[in-house]
Amino acid sequence: MPKARKIVFFFPSFASSDATAPLGILAVATPLIRAGYQVVLIDSTITPNYKQRVLEEVRDSICLGISLVTGPMIRETVEIAKAIKARDPEFPIVLGGWHPSLLPKQTLQSWYIDYVVCGQGEESFLELVGHIENQSSPDFVSGIGFKRDNKLIFTPERALRPIVEQPPKSYQIADFDAYERMCGRRWAMYTSSLACPFDCAYCTNGAVYKRKWNALPAEQFVEETVDLSRRYNLSMLWIVDDNFLVDLDRARAISEGLVQAEAEFQWSIQATTNLTSRLSLEDLKLLRRSGLHQICQGVDSGSPKILKAMNKTFQNFEDIYESAARCLAAGMRPSFNIIFAYPGEGAKERRETMNFIMDVCRRFPGTEFWTNIFTPYPATNVMNNATELGIEVPDSLEKWAEFFPRYTKLPWLNGHDHEELQVMRDYLRIAFDRIPIGIDRRTRMTRLAQKCISFPARFRLDHGLYRFPVELWLNDKLKERTAGFKPVVDARRLEPNPEPGEVTC
């Protein structure tokens, strides 16, 4: 069958019912569309028969592009790639995104991967597609890796371009109707700045963007987000900048511009606590009038010892308390992220963190905490000490699929400790309300019942009592009452298959 000027993109599921269009693919699609290529996006989160769809679409396409990050997304990537190669061993498969950018050599060593695109892929992928289409050598395409005569070849790194020089994202290829059916809300992600000036030891950002923060001007932010929300009838935008508040004057100008434009969408940001603490109550009220309803801040730990190990000495707890108080006074929801099981964290440090969380939530009702279990991602500062820490670094692309906080077993967090931490996190989820992106479809009775079980959950968290978790069982039964009212992503298909006799937690 003759090849059309068609590029197929596959986006593997991240096991989230709060899914929306993948920004990385929307970014690299724009130059292709401008060059006259047809672009097809298949997202497995909203496509039940995604494997069949991909196999059908690639029959007359030039290549398949897949964007992914470290973790479960790799599983579907491998599944699709192997299925295509079984039918046509010569069909080109290209991987891009964070994981291939951080581990290009190991990724390309997989027999079913033909090319990797590293870093910003807008220009690199367009040039690479041209060579694949013309069956010519891509040696002079910067920022890629490919195979020739069973050898891996990598071209020089492509220089990073400021975000202001990047083309707009191709939101028009996204099926927002399908995403709305998935989570009950029309929303999208938007990027207004790149990089973060800080160097947290667990973060991969520095390896890609070299901590060179740069941003779109306030006027462009206002014009694009207002148009985006109205064009696709979006009720919310999640601004995925690593640290939105680096330039406070820019944040104020954006707020003023959105108020003047009579923007009708809500938006959320993330920022470090030391920068958020610079916002006065008047600043926060202006941001709230512009539609900002949530600031997600990386607290990461309640232990000074662990914060020092994370290289987060730039923040202090007084700022965190003050930030929570001001956000609530401005009518905004403060949201904090916590990382448990960072190297060096023991029972004492974990108790410090839990005491801190409970204190903040009680003093400032409405505050929410989101917790994760530390995962040592590739190219982070902490991974430089992997051997010393006893971390068994995956030696292939496929093994990275199971490297994920939900079930990654760390040398210092295994067996009973791992299970207890998971139970503790589950109790924290029901002890205090959290607002997901998707629409809350619970009945009034279900909400009331879950409110009742939040009190014993708090008692357990205060005293570290996690045996016989009957409240978690009851909460699961309550959630089943709403299961029929919302789409459910089968996250279990992303979990590793347990060995015989093994219990997963």
Image (cartoon, rainbow, N blue to C red):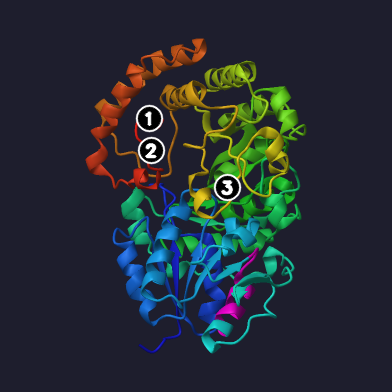
> On the picture, is 450 further left or further right than 431?
left
Quadrant in the rendering for residue 186: bottom left
> On the picture, is 444 further left or further right than 259?
left
Q: Is residue 479 magenta?
A: no
Q: CA distance from mark 2 to mark 3?
A: 18 Å
Q: Hey, what amino acid is under mark 3?
A: Pro
Q: State yes or no: discs 1 and 2 in contact (Cβ < 8 Å).
A: yes
Specify which label sits upstream in the sequence, 3 or 1: 3
The residue singled out by tag 1 in the image is: 503
Q: State yes or no: discs 2 and 3 in contact (Cβ < 8 Å).
A: no
The residue singled out by tag 3 in the image is: 394
Q: Is residue 7 above or below residue 22?
A: below
How many numbered marks appear?
3
Say few, some or many: other residues with alpha carbon within 10 Å of mark 3 (under 14 / 14 to 19 / 20 or more).
some
The part of the chain drawn in magenta is: 118-130
Q: State yes or no: discs 3 and 1 in contact (Cβ < 8 Å).
A: no
Q: Is residue 119 magenta?
A: yes
Q: Hey, what amino acid is under mark 1?
A: Val
Q: CA distance from mark 3 to mark 1?
A: 22 Å
Q: Is residue 208 above or below residue 335?
A: below
Secondary structure, mark 1, is loop
Residue 213 locus on image (x, y percent): 74, 54
> Residue drawn 43% across and 39% down?
436
The residue singled out by tag 2 in the image is: 498
Q: Is residue 67 visible?
A: yes
Residue 438 locus on image (x, y percent): 38, 44
